[in-house]
Structures are given as C-alpha cells and as structure tokens.
Amino acid sequence: MSTARRLAALAATALVPLAVLGVFFVLPVSGMVGRGFWPHGHLDVGGVLDVLTRPEIRRAVWFTVWTSTVATLLAGALGLPAAYVLHRVAIPGRTWLRAILVVPFVLPTVVVGVAFELLIGQSGPLAFLGLDGSPVAIVAGLVFFNASVVIRVVGGAWESLDPRPAEAAAALGASPRQVLRDVTLPALRPAIVSASTVVFLFCATAFGIVLTLGGLRYSSVETQIYLLTTNLLDLQGAAALSILQLLVVTLLLLAAAAARRTPDAGVARSRARLRRPARSDGPALLATFVLLLLVVGPIASLVVASLRIDGAWSTANYRALQTPGAHQALLVPVTDAVVNSLRIAVDATWMSLLLGLTVAALVTRRSRSRSERHLRAVLDGLFMLPLGVSAVTLGFGFLVTLGRPPLDLRDSPLLIPVAQALVALPLVVRVLVPVLAGIDDRLRQAAATLGASPVRALAVVDLPVIWKPILAAAGFAFACSLGEFGATSFLVRDDRPTLPVVIFRLIGHPGDLNFGMALAGSVVLGATTAAVMLIVEQLRVPSVGTL
Amino acid sequence: MAGTPALSVRDLSVSYDGTPAVVGAGLELDEGQVLAVLGPSGCGKSTLLRAIAGLEPATGRVRWHDQDVSTTPTHRRGFALMFQDGQLFPHLTVARNVGYPLRIRRTPRTAAAARIAELLELVGLSGFEGRLPSTLSGGERQRVALARALAASPRLLLLDEPLSALDAGLRQRLADDLRRILVEAGTTAVMVTHDHEEAFAVADRLAVMRDGRIVQSGPIADVWRSPADPATALFLGYARVVEGAAAAGLLAAAGIPDSVSVALRRSALSVADDGPLKGEVVDVRTTPGQLRLVVRTDHGELDAVASLDRRPAPGDDVRLRVDATRMARLPGRSASHQPALD
Amino acid sequence: MSTTRPHLRASARTAAAILLAIALAGCSLVGSDDKPAGTKDVVLVTHDSFVLPKQLIAGFDRQSGYHLVVHASGDGGTLTNKLVLTQGDPTGDVAFGVDNTFASRALDADVFAKSDVPLPAGAQQYVVPGDDGRLAPIDNGNVCVNIDTGWFADHHLAPPRSLDDLVKPAYRGLLALPGATTSSTGLAFLLGTIGRYGDGWSAWWRKLVANDATITDGWTQAYETDFTQGGGHGKEPIVVSYDSSPAFTVPKGSHTSTTKALLDTCFRQVEYAGVLTGAANPEGAKAFVEYLLTPAVQKALPDAMYVFPVRQGTPLPTAWARFAVQPQHPYTVSPAQISAHRDAWLREWSGIVSG
C-alpha cells in the first residue's frame, strides 16, 4: 500500500471516533467559546484578552496553579510509596486496600465535599485543626481525590517492571536507595510523568471540591468559569478562561509526551515476585498509612453519619432509599435512580469501549512514515483533551449547539451516556494503549503470512492479550459513568435521574431524612464503585496504563 | 533455468520516508529450490523478504508463475514467513501453534492432528504437543515456528534469519536439519541470512545483497567460485583480496589467467617444501585442525596454513604451494584491503 | 488430552463474554422509550429545587392530555442563563423558577413569549413591573436570617433582631450564610442588604466578613452542615435561610419550633413561570402554567418547595400556619435596578468576601 493510501485508511478508521469527538466535544466547546469571541456578531479578540488582566481572574489563575502544583506534588509524595507498597510488597489485604484507595476517584465531588465537611467542618471530629474553608482543606481534598491515580498508574508500571536491571545494579554494589534513584525511578519515569500530568489536570479543573471546601474565599479558574457562565453570563470571560484551559492542557500533554519518550517499561519479560515487608520499607509503609487515613477518614465519617439518626444507630436512611425522600424531594425513589444510573453506565461503558478500542488500535499501529507517526500522535493527544475542559462549558455547549437539526440530540436519551463515555474515554484509551503497544506487530504479521485475514489475526494475536484489559477498562468506564455529575446534571430528566444527581438534590432539600438519605446514597454509590473496582482487581490487569 | 521460474521479483524497491531500503531488486527461483539472500546486517535483505511477503509497501513486481501477486494482501499470497525469533503465539500450545494455519483452512480435526504429528516429527519434536512456547528452548521454538510455517503448505516459504538467534553449535546442527526438512518437504524457499556458512548449508542458489541492492546472484557454486567484486568475495568468506602485480604473481604461480585482483581463501596457500612461492613467517597461530600463518612474500603479507606436524616459527623461511580451487579471479578492485575477520 | 484444555478454556471464556454482553444489553437504554403512544410532551425546564408531588404531575397529564417531562438543573441563575443562551431554540416548552432577581434579564433577552395566563386573586401584586403577560408569578418566599432559639437561651445571649445586630461583636463567628455568587438564596440576601443600606451595603458586608461570618457556596452547606439545627448539627446558631424554615424544625411530638426567622432581615423572592419563545408545544406550555396556579398545586407548594402560594385564600399546612410567618415589610430592590447593577454588585461583593 502506498503512503497516501495508508493515510487514507487511517483517516477512515479514525472517522467514527473523530465524528463523536467532533459532535460531542469540539462543537459544544467551540460553540460556547465562539459566543465569547463574537459577543455582538463581530469578532472581539481584544475583549477576550482583556479579561485575563482582571485582578480577580489573575488571582484565580494563580490560585489554580499553586494549589494544583502542591496537590500534585503531595499526591506523588504519598502515592509513589503507596504504589510501591501495594504493588511490590506482600502485605495482607493488598487487594482490598487498592480497591478502597480508588473509591475517592469516582465519588462525585459533592459527596467528597460533604465527607470532608463532616470530618473537618465545625462539628466534625477534626474541627480543632481549623482547616475548614482554608486552602489546606482544598489541597487535602485534591490529594484525597487524586492519589489513587498515582497509585494505579505508577503501581501498575512498577508491578510489571523488569526486576533484572535493579538486580544487576545491586550486584554492582548499589544500595537500595541508589538502585531506586538510578534504576527504578528512571524506568518508572514515563508512568510518573503521565500520572502527574493527569493529576495536575484533574486538580486544575476541580470544581466541587474548591467550592465546597474553600467556601467563597478562594476561587479557581474552574469556579470562575462557573461563576462567569451561570451567574454573570459573562461569556467573554468564560471563553478567555476556557481557551486558557485548553492551552494549558495542550502544553501539558505535549510536555508529558516528550518526557515519557523513553522505551516503555511496560512489558517485562520476567516478573518480580512480591517481597516481604522489610525494615527499609518503613517510610513507604508510613506514607501509605497516612494516605489510607486521608482516604478512609472522610469515607468513614460518611458511613458513620449515614448510619446515625438523632444520636442513635439506625438503618432508616438506607431503608428510605426506596422512597422519593421527605417532602417529595424527588420524583422517583432513590432505588430507581440507582437502576437508572446502572443502565446509563452500561451504555456509557460500551460506547467508551468501542471508541477507546478504535482510538487505541489507531494510535498503537506501527507507523510507516514520519507523517503517519505524527498523525497518530496528534490523534492520541486529541482524545485526551476532554480531561482538561470545564464540565460547565461542555454542559452549556450541549444545550447551545445540539438543539437544531441535523444535530437535534439534546433530548435523546443516549446523550447522557455519550457525554459520560467521552469523560471516561481518556481513561479507557490509556488502559488499552500500553497493552496494544506491547504486542509485537510481527505476531500479527506471522498470523498474516500463515493465511490469517486481518480479523482472524486480531482474534488470535490481540484478543487473548487484550480481553482482560478490556474488562478492566470497562470497569473504569462503568465507575466513571456512575460517578459523573458535571455534564450529566445539565442533561438529565427528572423522572430518570442518576444517583449522583439524586444525591445532589437530596442534599439541597431541607430535612434530616433527606440529608441522611443523601449520605446513604453516597455510601451506596461508593460501595458500588468499590465493588466494580474489586472485580477489576481480581482480573489482575497489570496497570491502568500510562495516562 | 528452464521454463518460467516459480518466483520472480522484478525491480522491487522499498523506502522509508524517502530513505531507500531496497533498490530495484530482482530475483528468480525455480520450484523446489532454496535461495539464500546473503548480506551484512542493515543491507535491506529482511525488508526485501518482508516486501515479498507483502508486509512492506513496495514498488515493483512480485510474480508467482503467471500470477502477479504484487497487490495481493499478505494472507492471500500463500507465502509463509518464519521470523527470526519465531513469533509463536505465547498463549497457544505447540500443537495449536502448529495447527493454527490448518484451523484457518478448516482442516478436519483428525486430519489436522495427523498433520501436526507428522510436522512435529519432521522437526524432531514429537511429544511436544501440549507444551507452551515459554517452556521451550530457543532451538525448539524455532523448530516449532518452522513446523507452523510448513503447516500452511506455503507455495513459498520465507525464512528471516531463522537460525541467527541460536548459539553456534546448535546453529550448525539446525542448518543441516533445515536443509533436510526443506528437501524432504519439497519446499520452495527464500532464506535471508548474514552467515555464509548457513547459506551454503541450506541453499541451492545464492543472492548477495549490499546497500539495498542485489549485487550478484546465481547457483551457489557459481557465485562462490566467481564473486562479483572484492567486497562480495570478503563477505563470502574469502580471507583476503590481492590486487595488481601481487595478484598477477599469485595467479601465475597457480597457473590461472591474469586478472585485476584475486580473492584468496585462507587455505589457498599451504606450506609445502616444493611450493613455487617463498616467504618469511611473521605470525603463527594454532587451531585444532591446522596451523594458521601469516607469511611475508614478494606479493605482500598473505595468509597460509600448515599441517600440525610442522613447527614453523616467526622468522623462519618457508615455501608455499598455491591451490587454484581456493582462489577466485575478480573483475574489479576493492575499495578496502582489509580482510574479513574469519 | 492436554492439547484440548486451553481450547475448552477459550471457548468457555468466549461464551461467558457473550452471555455478559447479552445481559448488559438487556440493561441498556438503547431502544427503550416508555413514552405513552399518542400523547404530546410538555417539557418543563426548571432549577434543581423544583419539586411537585407525583400525583399532581400525574394529575396534569390526566387533565391536560399532555405528558409532562421535567428537565431540572442548576439554581435559578443557571436556569435563567441557560434560557438566555438557548433563546429561540429552547430545551423545553415552559420554564418555572426564574425569580425576581433574574426576571429582567430573561425578559430583556426575549426568552418568554406572551401567554396572558389569567392570574388568580392575590397574584397580581407579584407581577414584574412592565411585564406584558409573559411571566406568571407562582410562589413567593422570603430569605431571612434564622436563629436557633434554644442555643441563645442556653448561652444566655440575647438573640439578634436586625441586620445591624449581625455585625456586632456579640455575634462574632455565629453566622453561616450562602454566598451571593454561587447561591440564589445568597444573592437574595445580598439584595436585601442593598435594599436596607443602599450604597452603604459594602461597608456593612466588610464588617460582616470581619465579624467572622462563614460564607459557604450553597444554602445546603450553610443550613445543613453549619447551622446548629441543620441535619449535620453544626456550630453556628445563626443562618441565612427562609421564612418558612422554622416549620421544618419542629421536633416529633413537640409543639414548638426550635428556630425562628427574623422578620426584619428579609428579602422577598418571587418565582415565575412562562411559555418559552420558540416552544414546540406552546399550548401545552400555557396549560402547565395555568395548572401551577390551580388551587390544588398552590396548596401543595409549601410542603413541596417551602414557598408560599400566590393565590389568595390557599390554605397553609398546619405547621406553616403556626411557625412560618411572612414578614410584612421585606426589603425590596426593583427588578430594573437589579438588572442594571447585579453584575457590578456581585463583582464588588466577590472582592469583599475574598479580599
């Protein structure tokens, strides 16, 4: 095949995911940003740029940068040792700990906010620390939320790291610390860079946590976008910040791509055995313990609060989940919302898997020319963009751009799963890409020379390797969809709400029972998520991959 | 060659981002014959093989008898390719790896089982059916890969450095086995290798490749006897190329017509008391079969051998006999006078 | 038979995967649509505090012959901006929940179409000045400072009575309130202080912030987490909430509420409904607005959304009749003034509380 024909074939395969990304991401976001740039029918770039000189915007940008940076560093400082402990050391209950530590990542931020408030708020057991409403609380919340990303990504890479270079270094007289510095960390660099990039992006676009834990004394880029869009209807300002976000995301993804351009440590020929805990593991165990406290504390306070009514233990909050809440807070019982959430999650899962597999296959196939390689790299980056864009912008964008034929999709029941699938897509792609990239293309060629058609070659070569990662990706997509709130809240119908939306509404309605039900619903959501994660753990998929 | 050749490759070129890897390659091969493509690493010979298999985008023609297969996708060409490292499917047993092409062709189960047993016996691995690739040694894996490639009953078998991943002793034995298996199965095959010993052990015909071009091809003995140029000669295992007056002197001593340059095997000169050449021993090394000498003669420093019962020492004067069957006249001059290491 | 075992395992896996896929497909939304055949939808766009008892929603479907679909998200501000952004191509037919703090923006942007819904007695006084039959007032409520009466009794402290009191050192650190930029309750309270102090509002707010008021992002956190009588049993005995809130803090078996609204600190919020410009089903939309004004719905509003009905003579729930007292003279700011200055006020307010 000629280069031109290969590029054409590549483009044709990319068509479906690109179309989905175009309709459900590029179009809505550019629709909103466009309204900022063309406020009165004519282009006004200067007006947009002026926004960035406003003092409150500059404060928000600075606040976002420093909290995200500190939170990323802390998530790394706690997450790296925990990744080591949970993936390389034989400690009892490893699997359970890993599942628990992932729960925060998929909890809706509104629940995370409530959980933290229960702990450090004025009546919480940690109120004496005076953290409520401080930047410390925000950073703690961000770390709570994101440390699991570091554990997943780096832990997976660590687990499948070839132990022999480290053994060789040790045999040459390197101390464990030197081995860590000279051999292990450099080998883990791609994973660490990927994890840090994603954590930074998640922190920089965190919304609910900053709002709930920071009160109104602190505002970030994301809360500013929310304020400018939903309250002040200052689309120019929102557009300026959205562009800034996109710019930063792109730069970060580029930097990350450059920083991990080392041979992938992904596929090990010999696998390290778990080692028994030793005295030298002390600091790592301590860090893991601290992280565990940070994660378990808020979750435990949530569980306890959900089980207490008027100072006594009771399961009434859970039993009430079969009702629509006190004072008709909801149109349907919470259990209906659970079922609805599960159904939506099923759709979001298969959609993100289908898209994710196509994208992963596209970006991992061996390129035959430089232009083809560039094209694949661009595709890879393009599908990561949804990570860094405000849910408010996307949600409003849906309403603004998808209401007219031929794209009259606003009222389609499938819009919610599609939006959620898009949110889960970067994660799915990152699970699948390292696995697919690890398959020697010559195996497929061997199958082809033996007479296997491309489809048969896929069945014999790719499928046996990738079916477990596919299931794992499905688990992540499912959990992501279960917890998605931002975009969903813009699209949901009241008679078919999702669990996070219901939790949010219950919290917003007065009455002890409603509040209690919200807590109980959060516990159900967290438990479901943890269960999905435990199943994924049982599959023993080496890693979430390099994000 | 009589009639139309089974495989004919014409003007085949492959390039990556404008950098040529194979330039205008042409090959012909009769049914049932084995062709070795010999060349140093990086010369483009693997790319040529992969292009014949349809795995590389190429310009030019590949024909099988009267059928042009240049645009046929790999899996419909009926050419099997055996990779340097086997590329066994790691999750399938030996039997299922070997049986994979049979399954694709919907061979009935009993017939397939019989064929698998037959192929495994052919490669000397009877009883290995239930083993997984990860439990096999390198040599065993290559044998399985060969059996799998043969199971496809390919019109043409392409072998990409099939033995180079193995250690020396094993390589020798497996090369002989490979020749036997290919002949027994009557397979038409193209093998790529950088090892001339391997090429001689397995092939009927030889094509020498350098810098993306095929510089010489023909029956193995012909190519061997008359290398196209000094570099080819050195690559074919000749120890040294001598040019000009020295070449003339050596050729005269051997009683062969004059030429610009001549390639010498190490054993072309041997110590014999009645030899026509005189020289002084510069260096002596002992090998299990013979002594290897470097002798300074009127024609410059030359390699020579002596039987183990002689004891020449550096500084001794010796006489040398010239064996015309271990020399090759070359049409051109070499760019370099450096001998090959072997 | 060692050669067949991996084969069997692979088949079992494939079978399991197919079964799983089928099971999941059964749960999928694809192809599922439970809309009754032959009925036309009326799509209501509203904020996420919208609540109506199920039987009333069913009642609308029965009476009108339409099928009501509810799209609720965000607060009143988000709702209004959503309507403005989708002007002419609305996401529904009828909107409920634009209040008097946002009404001018919606009317200016031509979001609502003229529908001339007949108003019941008592509703006329809430109509947006200058509106020509586009927005129908549905309910009203007052944002007022609430106090935990028991707490003040226990601490032998005289409870505050006015806005002036809140900035006094005696009440330092005792107030929790939702922010004006992120909560419509907070915005209403800010407007109340502007109605009370005029241009002096910013000075009052500086003092309030200096007096250690806790400013949260939403009503929920202020009331449910920080307020001593909220679900989370917080630490602050003063909170910004509604005049109806005391009706919800009557312990079981008790005849008194544990909280009280300070009627001299209130700002009135009126919520409107209207037919959207470009609605696909304007008749259905109008029918729904009319339905919201029927005695049955008006009677249900207090329990459903903690607001007072606009229809004169609507009976209130017993707890309301006793504990939810409406202020006689709430502070007011005209919609036109709000429309003109809201953004500037909010920016200045943001600067004060985050400074």
Image: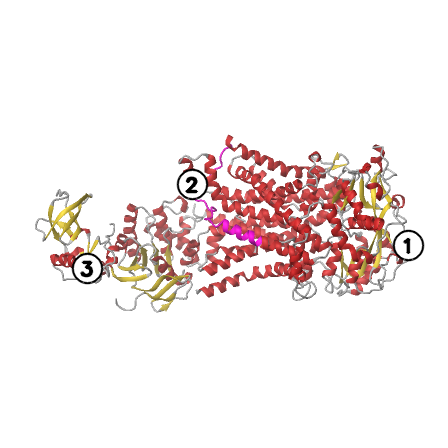
Are the residues flagged by discs 2 and 3 from a single subunit? no
Q: Which residues are magenta?
A: A249-277
Nearest the eye: A305 or A168: A168
Classify residue B5 by image quadrant. Answer: bottom left
Chain letter of the residue beneath label 2 in the structure image: A
**Pointer 2 with pointer 1, Cβ within 8 A:** no
**Callout 1: SS:** loop
Q: Is residue C17 left or right of residue C77?
A: left
Residue that label 1 marks: C312
Residue C306 appears in the rendering: no
Nearest the eye: C200 or C286: C200
**Callout 2: SS:** helix
Characterize the magenta stretch by its predominant secondary structure: loop
Which class describes the residues within 10 Å of circle 2: few (<14), some (14-19), or many (20+)? Answer: some
The three-letter code of the residue at mark 1 reads Gln
Chain letter of the residue beneath label 3 in the structure image: B
**Pointer 3 with pointer 1, Cβ within 8 A:** no
Chain letter of the residue beneath label 1 in the structure image: C
Residue visible at 17% across and 55% down?
Answer: B326
Residue that label 2 marks: A165
Residue that label 3 marks: B261
Counting from the top left corner in percent of width and height, residue B107 is at 42, 57
Q: Which mark is residue A292?
A: none
